[in-house]
Image: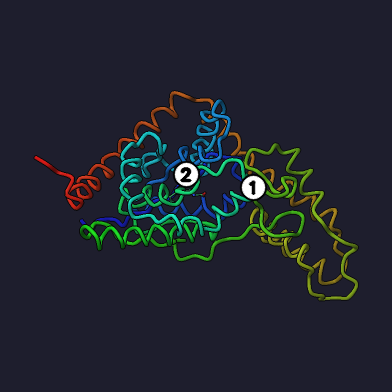
Amino acid sequence: MEKKQIVMSGIRPTGFLHLGNYFGAMRNYVKMQEEYECYFMVADLHSLTTHPDTKTLAESVRRVLAENIACGLDPEKAALYCQSHVKETTELYLYLNMLAYKGELEKTPTFKDKVRQHPDNVNAGLLTYPVLMAADILLHRAALVPVGKDQEQHLEIARNYAQRFNKRYAEVFPEPYPFNFGHQLVKVPSLDGTGKMSKSENQNATIYLADTDELIRKKVMKAKTDGGPTEPNSEKPDYIENIFNLMKLVSEPSVIQKYEEDFNNCTIRYGDMKKQLGEDMAKFIAPIREKAEAIQNDHIYLKKVMEAGAEKARISAGKTLDEVRKAMGLIYY
Ligand code: TRP
């Protein structure tokens, strides 16, 4: 049998998943698990770099896992695990640190951002964040890494380390590249008409998978609109286009067509349109939210998922590290 290609990605256990994560990332992961050998990991060690309140860590890790499973990730198909459960990660991280140059790491834009945001916590873990991420990926010798634009620089660093390792010791690692399953990544516009939905920016303009029906309706009703077009077949302003685009994600084609026509003949009532969008959005999210809640409270099930995922990950990691140690000459008897 032909060996499946390996896909690896990590999700930080911070914040709640939102509609942008769902359409941009999760749906892709769900498709990938059918065709690739997938490793999806909760990056709990990465989250320590910013000194979170560790009392809430367990809850956050469970939430991320529950939300991912509710979106369709199947622990039977993909290895779903927690970074700190696979200790091989930290061993490889140490080896890669020898190939990681301080000057390069200091130039990484995400590091510079963190320094600006938290000048009082510029720790070495933060500086070597990309080294740990490279370890996550190279641990499984994954070549395909589904990540957003914001992580591409980190991936380039991972490629550098793979090359350096292969050159210095022996050919062990493939070079990992960003991967989005041959599809354009779906961008989910924010409700305030500026940019995409995001964890960190305006929370009222982002729909979270954990939002109640009520809250979803409220957020959608607040989306920016205007008095409507005055000329037939006008061009839509960005913020109106966004509302149509959101509708395309969750509403019936006939509904969208009706509002397109209303827009084109200047009879559109944005209040009605947003009411419809709110309903459709709530209907779309409710089953995911309910499923995630049920899973999140089932600690026994989640423990089993994490254990099984870590076991799969450790098998793959163990094989890689055997080769790594051999390549590095770290075998003495
Ligand atoms: N750094 C990634 C983020 O902030 C999370 C992550 C950690 C990751 N390890 C990874 C992503 C490995 C892809 C592959 O989103």
Q: CA distance from mark 2 to mark 1?
A: 16 Å
Q: Secondary structure at mark 2?
A: helix
- Residue 301 rendering spot, x and y as whole percentages: 43, 27
269 with respect to 5 (left or right) = right
Residue at label 1? 117
Expressed as whole percent of the image width and height from the top left, the position of residue 10 reads 45, 47
- For disc 2, the neighbor class at 10 Å (few under 14, some 14 to 19, many from 20) is few
Q: Amino acid at mark 2?
A: Ala
Q: Residue at x 41, y 39 (%)?
A: 83
Position of the C terminus by quadrant: top left
Rendered-image quadrant of the N terminus: bottom left
Depicted 307 relative to depicted 241: above or below: above
* Vertical order, 62 against 49 (above or below): above
- Residue at figure coordinates x 24%, y 42% from the top left: 318
- The kind of residue tagged 1 is Gln
- What is the number of the mark on residue 124? 2
The residue lying furthest to the left in this view is 333
* Count of numbered tags: 2
Instruction: Using residue 39 as the reference point, say whether residue 169 is left or right of it.
Output: left
In the image, is residue 35 above or below residue 89?
A: below
Question: Which mark is first along the chain, 1 or 2?
Answer: 1
Q: How is the image coloured?
A: rainbow
